[in-house]
Amino acid sequence: MSERYSQSSETFKKVEEIKKSDLSDNIKLVASKVLEDKPPSKAELVYLLGLKDSQERKSLFDLASCVRHDNVGDTIFVKGIIEFSNYCKRNCLYCGIRSSSKIERYRMTKDEILDIAIEMSNCGVDTIILQSGEDPFYTTEMIVDIIKSIRETTQRPVSLSIGERTVEELRIFKASGASKYLLKQETVNREIFEKVHGFDYDTRISLLKALVDLKYIAGGGNIIGLPDQTLSDIADDILFMREIGVRMAGIGPFIPTKGTPLEHYPIGSADLTLNAYACTRISIPLVQLPTTTALGTIDKNLQYKGFEAGCNVIMVNFTPDIYRKNYRIYDNKRKVEFYETINDLSKMNRRLTSLIEKAVLNQR
Ligand code: SAM
């Protein structure tokens, strides 16, 4: 047994229960390894990702929930996202805001962004996430100005999700007050990556590693259900994120989008996505793991189910409706609305941060 789990820990009790059950030897072996703080091997991850039996899946999810409880607690962190520009110089095959999409484009001004950041802060959100397509219109100086203004006005942590920038820019953004950066690897299968993105795999991976080196709370992540992707590829994604030391993982199913080259490709599996959440939690116990909007787009209740599979974060959307309708990265993208989410989570007896609870009480 490792120092991470004492005999009174939830994980210890769950592993003992699994060991005494009539579940498969594979699950029992993984559970014992969790207790020794040893991550599942690639073959074990492939097995777990492919689980279909409801009893085995429930045990995996329960184990992931215990690992979450013992490592990061059961508080659900509510992060707020502003999608401030849908201009994108990339042409990713799956994405609705790809450069060749014939959509109405918008860019928000610094003042518009700041007003929303203040609203988010008043709501008590844990982090202000600034997301956009890859839009060089926003120069280094402009992004720095936005980060500094939000930090000075709200004091909330700022997370960037603006695609690839140079390492020097990443360093400058960090020095200006951004503490988190999400740059999903999307898939570590080079062949699939290059096919769906058409840009350089090595650059993407080296930038994600640079974020870790720059001491960002760095976020990786993947899309579940890309063309030709196998369980082995998804296992590689989880192992990769663990190995390079990401502290956040954004994992969501592929959702087809009209007008893109993948519009007729099948939707990613929600069950596989949930299995991937549980596998990621037991592989990277301290990870910040959102249950993603893409999963909620398939079904809102599936998104909440992510909390039963080891997730501890949800991102709520603060993009004004006039812009949000054009931030259509995939079809029927769910609007994860702040008060609806908080009320749902409260009904489910999920623990929220005191800042959120205070803001909700003030609202009543
Ligand atoms: N441009 C930034 C970047 O590349 O990191 C951030 C914006 S990008 C639209 C945010 C995420 O949307 C991507 O990392 C990708 O995983 C996800 N995404 C885009 N289209 C999707 C689709 N059709 N299905 C599922 N996820 C999708």
Image (cartoon, rainbow, N blue to C red):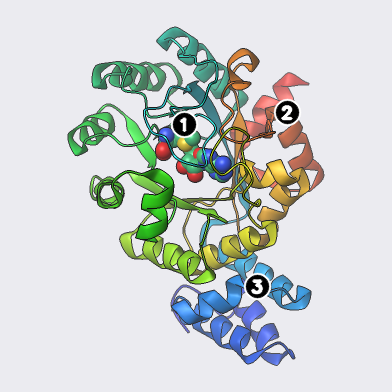
Residue 98 got which mark? 1
Q: Does the residue tagged 3 have its C-beta within 8 Å of any atom of ligand 1?
A: no
Residue 124: image quadrant is top right
Whole-angstrom CA distance, mark 2 to mark 3, is 31 Å
Identity of the amino acid at label 2? Answer: Tyr
Residue 165 vs residue 308, the one in the foreground: 165
How many marks the image carries: the answer is 3
**Considering the numbered disc 1 on the image, is that residue within a helix, a strand or a loop?**
loop
Identity of the amino acid at label 3? Answer: Leu
**Considering the numbered disc 2 on the image, is that residue within a helix, a strand or a loop?**
helix
Q: Are marks 2 and 3 in contact (CB under 8 Å)?
A: no
Quarter of the picture holding the C terminus: top right
Instruction: Give x and y (percent) for residue 83.
Output: 51, 25
Label 2: which residue? 339
Asked whether, in this view, residue 295 is left or right of residue 201, the answer is: right
Of badges 2 and 3, nearer the viewer stands 3
Whole-angstrom CA distance, mark 1 to mark 3, is 37 Å
Residue 179 vs residue 9, the one in the foreground: 179
Q: Is residue 31 above or below residue 217?
A: below
Instruction: Give x and y (percent) for residue 226.
Output: 53, 54
* Residue at the image position 53 percent from the left and 21 percent from the top: 102
Instruction: Give x and y (percent) for residue 87.
Output: 43, 22
Whole-angstrom CA distance, mark 2 to mark 1, is 31 Å
Residue 132 got which mark? none
Label 3: which residue? 60
